[in-house]
Amino acid sequence: MRRQRNTKIVATLGPSSSDYEMIRKLHETGADVFRLNMSHGSHDEIRERHRIIREVERDLDSTIGILADLQGPKLRVGVFANGEEELAEGASFRLDLEDKEGDATRVTLPHPEIFQVLEVGAQLLVNDGKIRLKVVDCGADFAETEVIAGGTISNRKGVNVPDVVLPLAALSEKDRSDLEFVCQLGVDWLALSFVQRPEDVTEARDLAGGRASILSKIEKPAAVKSFEAILEVSDGIMVARGDLGVELPVQNVPPIQKQLVRRCRAAAKPVIVATQMLESMIESPMPTRAEVSDVAAAIYEGTDAVMLSAESAAGQYPVEAVQTMDKVAQEVESDPTYREIIEASRKTVRGSVADGIVVAAREIAETTDIKAICCFTHGGKTALLTARERPHVPILALTPLRGTGRKLALSWGVNCVMTGELHRFKQAVVNAARAARTHGYATEADQIVVTAGVPFNVPGSTNILRVAPCEERLIFASDPE
């Protein structure tokens, strides 16, 4: 399904978007990838949503990516005798391992691993940072704190510990079970929460065993500090601004977002900007001006995708939210300033032959009347390198592997076309020309750029580029075997 934009849209499924009609409508409206949030919904519900997505894919002869978002370990306080207490600024409050109900002076924090690494001066953030506690004394089983920002604290509220690297694996027992379940279902991407170090990513990759690509969520200060190492072992990145904005000063998030997007693009790995993008549309059919500007800013930065969370999962206007993102993306990408920003932020990469091929393809498309860049890709690498260049003409990724096509649904500007296994370059050129004509990217009078690797069907072997006519008679008359 051809889009009139390059930036992709990820839509989360949930109670507001769980039946065939709604999921189909969301895809037709603009959702390129569907997110299954493993924090909500039973395995039976997740299985049914996965089945429906694949049914929509078949019915529309489309290529849809599926992203399963693992919950990650959840750190929470215990329960209170009165259900909740009010903490005043400047008061003392104790967190400990005692197995008894809390009161206005203390509560259980049933996570000994936190106490192992706490230091005097560290902060503990409760209930998405609404309550801030500063550690004044601590030991192996307690932390005495001063209330820096007070408020109501209640049963099982979440706790963030931004100032230390916690000795916790990114995968809980629930995550391990969920990971195996969704890999057996056949999802395309796994989003990994609570990433602090590259070892968290490699553990998930080992468990996935090549059945899904790994996308690391950057939501902790430790992940920002170790970003280059995390990026190297990840297939993609999500800038998860929710927890990131809790654990860091909110004013730090926009520059971090911009830096991470550019570093992902330079590495030719897809990046999603997520969280609260159109938050008001959970209850309103119209977004705020600030939300529209936020979505636009991410697109101007060159992000591969923008994401809807509760807006499409539990909101009253899921279709309108997708439509809004679609319209914003089209408007931004038609702005000449967008192209100026994209080209100014492009970095020259000197590396493999494939790097040179995709740079040449983009430069030829910029200086001649080329209608599309058609790249044959087995594992997706050639398409990712082409997307890194952000060419001003459409990218057609032709692949014999359905899984590769679904994975590339997340990547900027990539339009996937399924093709059979190829063995001769002339056959590849003919298939590319037919795909460009069939899907409305070119006519017989036009030319395209074709990139491929010889020998065929070997991942990472891109080594040939051809400017080809779209008229098959001319291909057979002029192209080499």
Image: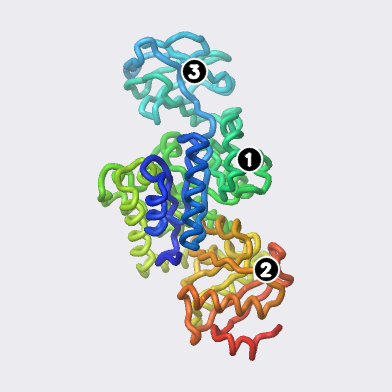
Determine which residue is flagged by label 3. Answer: 109
Query: Is tag 3's residue or tag 2's residue first in the polypeptide sequence?
Result: 3
Whether residue 366 is visible to the viewer of this picture, yes or no, is no
Look at the image and tell me in which quarter the C terminus lies. bottom right
Task: Give the alpha-carbon distance from disc 3 to disc 1, as whole Å.
Answer: 27 Å
Q: Secondary structure at mark 1?
A: helix
Instruction: Give amino acid for label 3.
Output: Leu
Q: Position of residue 172 (x, y in %)?
A: 58, 30
Residue at 54%, 64% (x, y): give it: 416
Task: Determine whether, in the image, residue 216 is placed left or right of residue 253.
Answer: right
Residue 385, image quadrant: bottom right
Determine which residue is flagged by label 2. Answer: 421
Q: Position of residue 277 (x, y in %)?
A: 36, 47
Query: Is tag 3's residue or tag 1's residue first in the polypeptide sequence?
Result: 3
Q: Secondary structure at mark 2?
A: loop
Whether residue 191 is visible to the viewer of this picture, yes or no, is yes
Q: Nearer the viewer, mark 3 or mark 1?
A: 1
Residue closer to the observer: 215 or 17: 17
Instruction: Give amino acid for label 2.
Output: Glu
